[in-house]
Image (tube, rainbow, N blue to C red):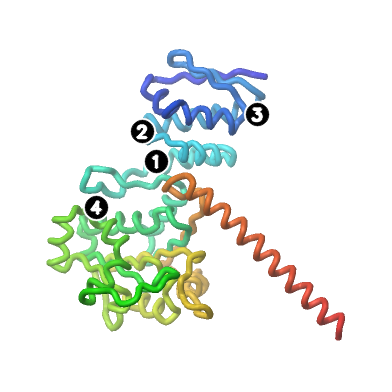
Amino acid sequence: MIEQVVNVERIEQIIELFGSFDENIRMIERDCGVNIVNRDTELKISGEAENVLLAKEAVETLLRMASRGEEISAQSVGYVLSLVRKGRQEQMISQMEKGVICVTVRGKPVKAKTLGQQAYIDSIKKNIITVGVGPAGTGKTYLAVACAVAAFRQKEVNRIILTRPAVEAGEKLGFLPGDLQNKVDPYLRPLYDALFDMFGPEAYHRYLEKGNIEVAPLAYMRGRTLDDAFIILDEAQNTTPEQMKMFLTRIGFGSRAVITGDITQIDLPDGKISGLKEAMQVLKDVEDIGISFFDHRDVVRHELVARIIKAYEKHDAARQKKTLRDKAKKNYRIKKKD
């Protein structure tokens, strides 16, 4: 048993670290198998040597986050602990120093919360086309819209074009009322929400009327050349290979594109190949195209979402393993019969 002491500059940092009802510090104690006691501006960590050093690194990293104004939640505690175990906590601090992408209409700064998100943002800034692939809640669409708004405000592009395929998510919606725009609006709602958050309703409608913002179904892209635009294709797992090729060949001079999707949530009819899955193979070695992958550690929604995604990943891996095993048995029986 050993004891290590962490000195804290301000009592506010300790309050932020401990969290509501001390939930954050209890999480560190449970995860690391240590005991943490607060005495004024000192934190005393006791337990087995290896566990104490792990907890100390996590506490110091979280305190550095708190000193930069970062919110310390149960989710961020879990993420920091996973990074400390891999010795990657310094990468987390470096990522925080990269700053804000843009600020929402309510004054909320938008920035990367995980290393996966930072790699995605870096790819968007570096490449003409970036493909972001990962589960729900990892910020693929929201961060892409934030990058688009930042580029528009800095006059790097003249237009923001958001599009997605109008594919029903496993349920038949029937005949929707209204004109064509009314019919496609439900499919485009997540994109509207992100733009409203960045610009506010008044500015959004003003830019929409002037043609600086366009939100439309993917079918509207055919036959066009999109110059000086930041283009986002959302829910790209529901494109066909033909649609994906059509979209990729729309990109003109001075434009940048981000393609987002989750290959575990394909809503295409059975037997249809996903354009996103094919594009990931076709484009992986093409210059000026970056592919970023997210996993459950990049989820920034409720922590339960990350646990759900992890459970499904485990289930899918087991099912795939069983399929391969059954196939091998079948081939063995056929060979034995011959």
Q: Earlier in the sequence, mark 3 or mark 1?
A: 3
| Circle 2: residue type | Arg
Which residue has dot 3 on it?
A: 50
Which residue has dot 4 on it?
A: 198
Spatial distance from mark 3 to mark 2, Cα to Cα? 28 Å
Question: Could you say where residue 204 lies in the image, as x and y percent from the top left?
Answer: 18, 59
Mark linked to residue 96: 1
Q: Residue at the spot x=31%, y=56% of the render?
A: 147
Q: Earlier in the sequence, mark 3 or mark 2?
A: 3
Mark linked to residue 122: none
Question: Could you say where residue 208 lies in the image, as x and y percent from the top left?
Answer: 17, 65
Label 3: element kind:
helix
Q: Which is more toward the observer, 283 or 144?
A: 144
Label 4: element kind:
helix
| Circle 3: residue type | Glu
Which residue has dot 2 on it?
A: 68
Q: Which is more toward the observer, 106 or 62?
A: 106
Q: Which is more toward the observer, 47 or 302?
A: 302
Q: Is residue 66 visible?
A: yes
Q: Which of label 3 and label 4 is nearer to you?
A: 4
Which quarter of the rendered picture does the N terminus lie within? top right
Q: Is 300 situated above or below 238? A: above
